[in-house]
Amino acid sequence: MASLSVSLNLNGSVGQGGKNQSHDVLAVKNRLADLGFIVTRDSIVNSEIIDIIKLFQSIIKGETTIVGDGRIDLNGPTLKFLQAANAPQWLEMPKGSASEGFINHDERQGDNHDFGTNWMVETIQAAAQIYLTVYLSSHPTAALIQTNDLSKPKGGITPVHATHQTGLSCDLRLPRKDGQAGGITFRDAQFDRDAMRAMLKAIHDQDKYKIRRIFFNDLSLTAEGLCKNAPSHDNHVHIDIISPQPQ
Ligand SMILES: [Zn+2]
């Protein structure tokens, strides 16, 4: 999923209140579309592209809710990251499989919260590889990592989460002793704490992206420093990552 840095050669600002010269707008929209963001490849400035610029600005600031002024200024941080080799890509969470160590619950559920940054996706993929090697290889009947909601197809506000607006958040369903996942809290006898511990360690140990925080209320695992308490996190794990610097 590596990409190359690009030079957009803008003559003026693009977006909310920008100069919006048509070839500049087209260059920005083509770049965002190449990165997977859902924009049309034309030189029209409308609420769609402004919302996507705000999404992009929120991602590069590491925010989990939408911030940003919706404008790309010459010499500003948004243009710098838009041209960077590690510019965030926007994609659907892969389906996953036993051989990858994770599966994507949204793929079955179809609740439209399946999109996020390649940064979050690669964090899960890297953690799942560690979980496969360190734990599943010796506990073959344990549950796979099971991801649930990331963000909506165009990001932005979602009624079912306080955050999850920018593709930097992902939830996990709780592993069960029967090898399945979800439908329980940490208090349930079916909860597989050892598998959960191995998953959380793998998330902390992967070195693709830095972890900002993990919310989950299990008493033992919080005492071990693997996660932190937060309201409404008895029945799932919530992960936020930190945005890297542009390269
Ligand atoms: Zn969450």
Image (cartoon, rainbow, N blue to C red):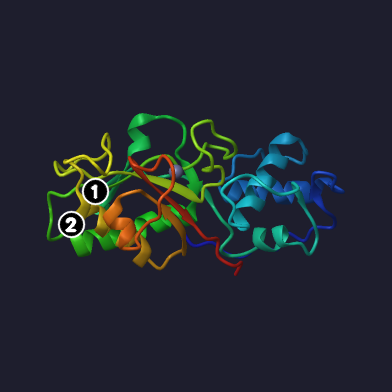
What is the x, y in percent for residue 118? 48, 53
Quadrant where the C terminus is found in the figure: bottom right
Q: Secondary structure at mark 2?
A: helix
Instruction: Report the amino acid beneath label 2.
Output: Leu
Residue contact between numbered discs 2 and 1, judged by CB atoms under 8 Å: yes
What is the x, y in percent for residue 119? 48, 57
What is the x, y in percent for residue 66? 64, 44
Q: Is residue 210 visible?
A: yes
Q: Residue at the location (59% across, 50% down)?
A: 34
Q: Which of the four quarters of the rendered structure image does ligand 1 lie in?
A: top left
Residue with the mark numbered 1: 144
Residue with the mark numbered 2: 136
Crowd tier of the residue under label 2, counting other residues whose Cα lies within 10 Å: few below 14, some 14–19, many 20 or above? many
Q: Is mark 1 within 8 Å of ligand 1?
A: no
Q: Picture quarter containing residue 176?
A: top left
> Is 219 above or below relative to 134?
above
**On the rendered structure, is 238 left or right of 179?**
right
Q: Is residue 31 visible?
A: no
Q: CA distance from mark 2 to mark 1?
A: 8 Å
- Nearest the viewer among 61 and 101 is 61
Considering only order in the chain, which callout, 1 or 2, is on the residue closer to the N terminus? 2
Q: Residue at the location (59% across, 44% down)?
A: 37
